[in-house]
Amino acid sequence: MHPAIRVVSLIVLGSAIALSQGRAVLFATSLVLALYVVTSTTHLAPALKMLRRMRWLFVSIVGFYFWFTPGEPLWDSASSWLPSVEGMQQGGARIAALVTLVLAVNLLLQTTPRDAMVSAVLWLTQPLRWIGFAHERLAVRLTLVFEAVREVQSLYAAAAPPSTERRTPLARFGERVATLFEQTLQRADVQDLQPLSVDISANPPWYQWLYPLLTGMAMAAVLASERLG
């Protein structure tokens, strides 16, 4: 599949998830998990790492929605300390939406090479030339960001302090970040400039536009039934 079609399909899926209150999120989750099965379930490992790093965000969503959303208590009206049913429904829907988006973005990144991703962005932003926007700069910056993230990840893994030292987690994290910052500055000082070329992808076959179109129609139908039901 053309990389631009993958990006557009992700945008369509993410837009529908943002408008959903639950049913469309479940449909999107099922669709994304089916794509993992079709491609490779080994792609789930990076997504699980990303979700683990977001655990405190999920905890904050639970606290905010479950207890600060007006509605009926979970068991009886006398128990005001219990979370509300409406809060649990809305909070659960938001968490499920975030999980689905992370899974979808991870699948796109795992199945699309970096050069193909940059080419897709460059192809999709070509119309911006009509308003004087240099879309080539966007593609170059995106390439540099991808390269920098990969290097910083390797530096961060190498900056881990010895596990035998008895220190608090906060102290270990602070030392690790300080080491990473110093190594990043040193790498920037000694790294040579290299030429960079990014090619624009060829136009995708017309029939591949059916993928985001059908995805949008299916999500629109689920959203409509969600509103009516």
Image (tube, rainbow, N blue to C red):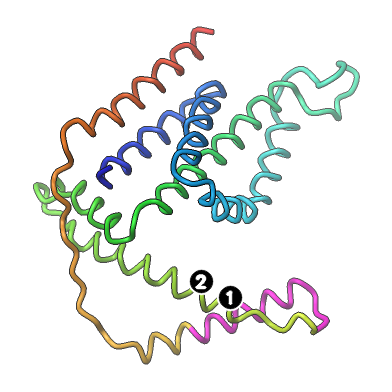
Circle count = 2
Question: Which residue is tagged 2?
Answer: 153
- Pinpoint residue 210: horizontal percent, then vertical percent: 25, 28
Seen at 50% across and 86% down, the residue is 183
Up-down relation of residue 180 to residue 18 (above or below): below
User: Magenta span covers which residues?
Assistant: 165-183
Please tell me whether residue 177 belongs to the stretch shown in magenta. Answer: yes
- Pinpoint residue 144: horizontal percent, then vertical percent: 32, 69
Q: Which quadrant would the C terminus be assigned to in this image?
A: top right
65 relative to 44 in the view: left or right: right
221 relative to 42 in the view: left or right: left
Q: Residue 225 got which mark?
A: none
Q: What's the magenta bit mostly, secondary-structure-wise? A: helix
Who is closer to the viewer here, 114 or 14?
114
Q: Secondary structure at mark 1?
A: helix
Q: Amino acid at mark 1?
A: Ala
Question: Which residue is tagged 1?
Answer: 157
